[in-house]
Image (cartoon, grey):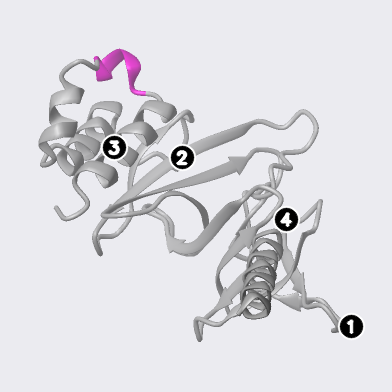
Amino acid sequence: MKAFKILALLFLCTILHLSNAYAQQDYVINRNHDTVFCKIKENFFSGILKYKVSGERKDKDFDDVIGYFLAADTATFVYKKIPGRMSFTYVKWLERGKINLYELILTSGYRNITNGFPVGSFGNSGSGQESNKYLYISKGTDSLIQIKTDAISFNNIGSHKERIKAFLDRVSDCDYVATELKYSDLNKNYDFDLIQSFIKMYNDKCPDK
């Protein structure tokens, strides 16, 4: 019996070790929804992404990749249609739940989008380059909607007031969030951190809305 307990403990330790090992690996998810553990690389100049599977000689293109995870940043990116753009691109998945929050960073001085991949998705904005941030949300199965940006450009959708309204329209059906919002002056304090904190609050307090 004692030997059995020891073996069971060793088995559990092995599983935990493997789980941690996988958690420290990059991976991609393809169109068949298979998870492929790999090493993801970004070309410094073009921003084009490739991945390499252990034991294989050649890097692979992102042609069939619908999402990926970067272990170094514990960041997940998903392939989404961005409002105001003709093509899809990868956006960082900040919060997930009934309401999903996504971030896109575009960097000036480069082609912002190269073959559908955001330049600087690894935080590589380049020396002397200016980066602009965009936040998008989707509720349930809705399309993405822009709710915040620090840029003044053609990528903006709606006015500042319209973006605040779009945000409020999607979170105010949660009574707890609506109460907390009464203490926030969004006209002055509508920043990226505040938005993320309220969406996290919504998903925690009203996951079934």
Residue designated by label 2:
134
Q: SS of the residue at dot 1? A: loop
* Residue 158 image-quadrant placement: top left
Residue range (magenta): 185-190
Question: Between 170 and 5, which is closer to the camera in this rendering?
Answer: 5
Question: Can you give x and y, in whole percent of width and height, for residue 122 in the image?
Answer: 69, 48
For residue 116, side relative to residue 204 (left or right)? right
Spatial separation of the CA atoms under disc 2 and disc 4: 18 Å
Residue designated by label 3:
201
Residue designated by label 4:
47
Q: Please give the name of the residue rendered at 17% of the width and 55% of the height, measured from the top-left corner.
A: 208
Does residue 57 lie above or below 16 as drawn? below
Question: Can you give x and y, in whole percent of width and height, for residue 107 in the image?
Answer: 64, 40
Quadrant (top left, top right, bottom left, bottom right) of the N terminus: bottom right
The outermost residue toward the right is 57
Question: Between 1 and 72, which is closer to the camera in this rendering?
Answer: 1
